[in-house]
Amino acid sequence: MRADARRNRQSVLNAAYEILATEGLGVPIDEIARRAGVGAGTVYRHFPTKESLIQAVVLDRLHALTEKARSGIDFAEFFTVMVDAGLTNRAIADALAGGGYHIPADADAALTAAFAELLHEAQQRGTIRPDVTADDINALVTGCVATARHRGSTILVQIVIAGLGA
């Protein structure tokens, strides 16, 4: 892909992420194109359907989360990042919960492995209980997102992180 095509694609992804997060899935492709500074044809060239654009946004954000997990961040910080990602965008929350969007297995596995590695490191340091599994953590992230959406408060995140302590 040419450099300008890559830039256009990334501009569309960034605009779509922001718009979908704030305005929901009902936003027309034309509005996403306008905010990305490209024509609708450019959007359709990269993403033939709105569903493919939504999936690409989710996949792009999952890759960003995986990179963040591998950046040297600690477990508690990353747990908070994951909950924030789910709160910021329902599509991300659905993907993290394992529903709503088809996520390629390698992207899902990479994020799961990176988060599991952070968990393992925290357990080796003795900061997280040794009996907690990666599946437990995924369920806790999903639960924190759902509760924060319902209650409008993220206090549960701090309570869960404290409760995970060794």
Image (cartoon, grey):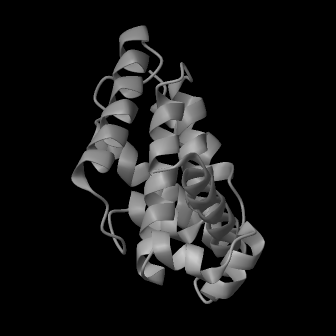
Q: Position of residue 30 (x, y in %)?
A: 67, 86
Q: Give the residue furthest to the left.
A: 105
Q: Quadrant of the C terminus?
A: top left
Q: Is residue 72 above or below residue 62?
A: above
Q: Is residue 47 above or below residue 116?
A: below
Quick check: can you spot residue 129?
A: no
Dividing the picture into quarters, in which one does residue 110 lie? top left
How many discs mark residues in the rendered view? Answer: 0
Identify which residue, 16 or 48, lies in the foreground.
Answer: 48
Q: In the image, what residue occupies the spot 45% across and 51% down?
A: 1
Q: Is residue 41 above or below residue 140?
A: below
Is 4 on the left-hand or right-hand side of 131?
right
Q: In the image, what residue occupies the spot 75% across and 69% down?
A: 37
Identify which residue, 97 or 70, lies in the foreground.
Answer: 70
Q: Position of residue 143 (x, y in %)?
A: 47, 59
Q: Position of residue 148 (x, y in %)?
A: 63, 63
Q: Give the residue furthest to the front.
A: 2
Dividing the picture into quarters, in which one does residue 27 lie? bottom right
Q: Position of residue 90 (x, y in %)?
A: 55, 70
Quick check: can you spot residue 128?
A: yes
Q: In the image, what residue occupies the spot 58% across and 53% down?
A: 85
Q: In the image, what residue occupies the spot 33% across and 45% down?
A: 136
Q: Is residue 102 above or below residue 155?
A: below
Identify which residue, 165 or 85, lies in the foreground.
Answer: 85
